[in-house]
Amino acid sequence: MARVTRDHQRSTPPTICWRGRRGDLSSGDQEGNQVAIRAGRSLLDQRRVLLHELAHWLTDRGHTELFWSTGVDGRLDRPLRVQVRGPDPNPHLA
Ligand SMILES: [Zn+2]
């Protein structure tokens, strides 16, 4: 996270608050420097939601072209080394 913060000229990394939720899928919110993840059982979906909310944090925008290119093209995946282990309970997301 420190590398992503530095690479994108942000002064401080976001505060990430994790909470569990029932079911397989996760959801998240971002406001300012706060990212909230409500994590379901699917590790792959947790990863996708985290990257989605971090892309909002980096771009400070809604779902614009800049937003999608930040989170979806892999620029966040590699430096964050987000790990996904185990079988995914949602094969449609794979
Ligand atoms: Zn969004």
Image (cartoon, rainbow, N blue to C red):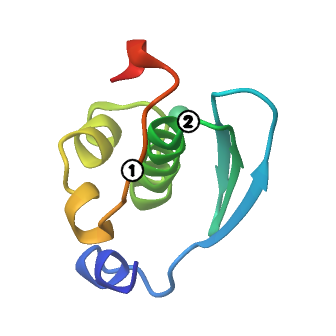
Q: Quick one: which residue is furthest to the top in this view?
A: 92
- The residue shown at (27%, 39%) is 72
Horizontal and vertical percent position of residue 64: 36, 32
- The residue shown at (51%, 43%) is 43
- The residue shown at (50%, 58%) is 57
Q: CA distance from mark 2 to mark 1?
A: 9 Å
Q: Nearer the viewer, residue 41 or 70?
A: 41
Q: Secondary structure at mark 1?
A: loop
Horizontal and vertical percent position of residue 29: 68, 46
92 relative to 65 in the view: left or right: right
Type of amino acid at the residue the image marks with label 1: Val
Kindly identify which residue carries mark 2.
Answer: 42
Which class describes the residues within 10 Å of circle 1: few (<14), some (14-19), or many (20+)?
A: few
> Taking 35 as reference, is 68 above or below it?
above
11 relative to 33 in the view: left or right: left
Horizontal and vertical percent position of residue 22: 81, 32
Kindly identify which residue carries mark 1.
Answer: 84
Horizontal and vertical percent position of residue 21: 80, 39
**Residue 2, numbered circle:** none
Type of amino acid at the residue the image marks with label 2: Ser
